Amino acid sequence: MIRQLLETTAHTHSHLWEFLYYASCGGFSLLFLLVFRNKMPQDQGRAFAVNGEKSKGKARGVGILFILAFVIATFLFVQIDWEAAILLVLILASMLTGFLDDAGSTPWGGLKKGLLDLAISVGAGFTAWYFYGSELRLHSLFAAFNEKCITLPVWLYIILAAALVWASINVVNCTDGVDGLCTTLSILALTGFAVCGGLSFCSASTEELAIGMICVLLPYLWFNASPSSMLMGDAGSRALGLFLAMIALRSGYVLLYIPFCLIFLLDGGLGLLKLALLRSVKIHILKNTRTPLHDHARKNKGWSDTQTVLRFAIIQALILIVTVTALWSCK
């Protein structure tokens, strides 16, 4: 907003505005976390989670603080058009539904959360189609080294885009069970999209938004590193899941979501798949594997929280390096 007003009367250096944007993202996030941390609801501990009792008494739902920091900084320092504005609204909606669940005296039921996620996901699917079109761009890495573009029927594109957003919201939410894990994996995924930011074809670049979100996450990670003093809760994890999916959709190369978010998909997605198969067709897979996988690593393998985060992050970082190297080699 400020950038748009000033650039109408003066020539400004784009790098200066980028610096101000990133600095404001990190600064607002740190300020909000320090000022409002004691006003947030306290976690009651999770009876069935591994080490769930250790979370009792910690500030919970602080995702609302760093997500608000991101939205405010983006509104002030990034050129906002209708696409960017709706993206911010979707992030706020996902954050708000998560925060209301965090702040409630009793957790929301699965049906209520599922319907809310569905409504937001369908809205995101329509948004993606309206602003990005129904073309599925296949980078040469995924198209036998011959970049292709497939135009999908509008109804199919909307369904697939909504499904991606819904899945992303839930797998990222499931991964938020170990101090620092969800945040670290999000930063790695966003780094991948930032490196490939030149693929974006929207007014506010994918690279710019991805780095902005990284900047708001870093102050939170400082307090969330094991042993943590605050937790993002559903307010943060659900908003991050939506953001990662929308960044992939707006980049035009949605298949990059798979390698950049692979640990999210395995850690949180296997548990959702296991539950869905058991409830729908009574098929029980991974009988000897605890899900999410971070609980299996801690409970069955005896890994500490720090070992779990670092080892998962190392695997994701290696996947990220291989993918980015392959993408650049195909240029």
Image: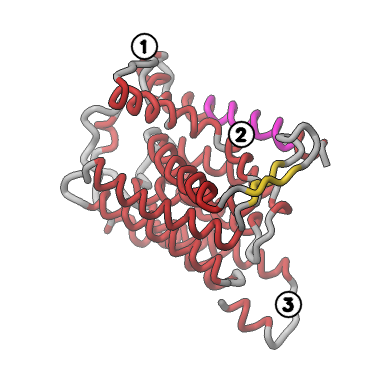
For residue 120, side relative to residue 87 (left or right): left
Q: Are there few (<14), some (14-19), or many (20+) residues within 10 Å of tag 1?
A: few
What kind of residue is marked 2?
A: Pro
Labels 3 and 2: the sequence-earlier one: 3
Tell which tag, 3 or 2, sits nearer the viewer. Answer: 2
Choose between 261 and 159: the one closer to the eye: 159
Colour scheme = secondary structure
Residue occupying the point 40% across, 60% down: 92
Q: Are marks 2 and 1 in contact (CB under 8 Å)?
A: no
Is 318 above or below relative to 130?
above
Q: Label 3: which residue?
A: 12
Tell which tag, 1 or 3, sits nearer the viewer. Answer: 1
Residue 217: tell me if it is visible: no
The answer to which quarter of the image holds residue 38 is: bottom left
Q: Label 1: which residue?
A: 288
- How far apart are the two marked residues, 3 and 2, measured between alpha carbons? 37 Å
Is 46 above or below relative to 39?
above
Q: Are there few (<14), some (14-19), or many (20+) residues within 10 Å of tag 2?
A: some
